Image (spheres, rainbow, N blue to C red):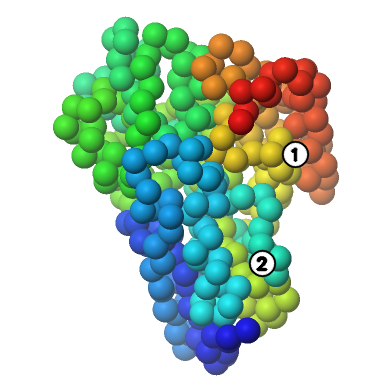
Amino acid sequence: MASADTTENMIRIGTRGSQLALAQANEVRDRLIAAHEMDLQVEIEVISTKGDRVLDRPLSEIGGKGLFTEEIEERLADGRIDIAVHSTKDMPTALPDGLELSCYLPREAAQDAFISNNYENVDELPEGAVVGSSSLRRKALLLRMRPDLKVVNFRGNVQTRLKKLEEGQVDATLLAVAGLNRLGMQDIIRSTMDEKSFPPAPGQGAICIESRTGDERISNLLAPIHDHVTAVRLEAERAFLRELDGSCRTPLAGYAEFDNDMLLFHGLILKPDGTESHDVHLAGHWQNAESLGTEAAMRLREQAGDGFFDDWT
């Protein structure tokens, strides 16, 4: 296996090339430099992924979450980069052998933002309005609220989607509040979707760092910037996702919050057209985060029955 420069004060970060991905990589870089008194050298390498290149089809048609990680993980596995920075909601639950999610930054807001040039919220949209979204979860939740809406596929980075909105291709779109905050674009948010009735995707709002299993040098460098609270919440959410075989083909939501030593979990599954949904609320000690997420998924499977998942193809 080729090896990256293992000089103690050098670390190479791999990332996608969108403005948001670069903002996230730069946040990791800044936190690493601030956490270490030594003269740490941090390089950022932009890596193109299939998910960034293929924009004319829904994610569910071209492979799901791994589309945004495969090329980056290849470079991580063979040592050309030391760590990879991802949006956690883009990460498959099964990682390549020898790689792990070793660090989480403190979670940003997890909610979705409603963006429109003419309307303040979903309720104000006229009958038959067109909303753009590439997320099956957002589409299903929107149709659950407003079956009259037309939800169309809306791929591309934040800037591309906003340009399409400005051109009048759609009446509104939904974007993650966290991404807009990281880009300094909070001013375009017309309203925020309530996380209780419009729960987020597992991992939404959280930046994760992927590294090689057993790489002690990197583990030691990452330790000071790791956020334990975020890691526990994401342990429950990703266990939920894993139990339901979650990918970009599955409209589901999962969100964990702390209440003292307890973890409160809300899980939701929907038919793609929003006509049927099932949700579960569970609480457990934070040390049982993984089993809490798994139990929530199992309860939803039991509630919904096997036929519910026939559309999850």
Q: Residues within 10 Å of mark 1 (few under 14, many from 20)?
A: some
For badge 2, the amino acid type reads: Leu
Q: Where is residue 193 shown, x and y percent of the image?
A: 45, 26
Decide: is 84 above or below 308.
Answer: below
Q: Where is residue 257 shown, x and y percent of the image?
A: 66, 38
In the picture of the structure, the residue carrying the numbered disc 1 is 243
* Mark linked to residue 23: none
- Upstream in sequence: badge 1 or badge 2: 2
In the rendered structure, the answer to whether residue 254 lies left or right of residue 33 reads: right
Q: Where is residue 85 shown, x and y percent of the image?
A: 51, 63
Residue nearest the viewer, comparing 258 with 96: 96
- Is label 2 in a helix, a strand or a loop? strand
* Mark linked to residue 99: 2
- Is label 1 in a helix, a strand or a loop? helix
Question: Would you say the residues marked 1 and 2 are in contact, meaning their CB atoms lie under 8 Å apart?
Answer: no
Examine the image and state in which quarter residue 243 appears: top right
For badge 1, the amino acid type reads: Glu
Q: Where is residue 75 shown, x and y percent of the image?
A: 52, 73
Residue nearest the viewer, comparing 47 with 138: 47
Measure how far apart labels 1 and 2 are at the Cα level.
20 Å
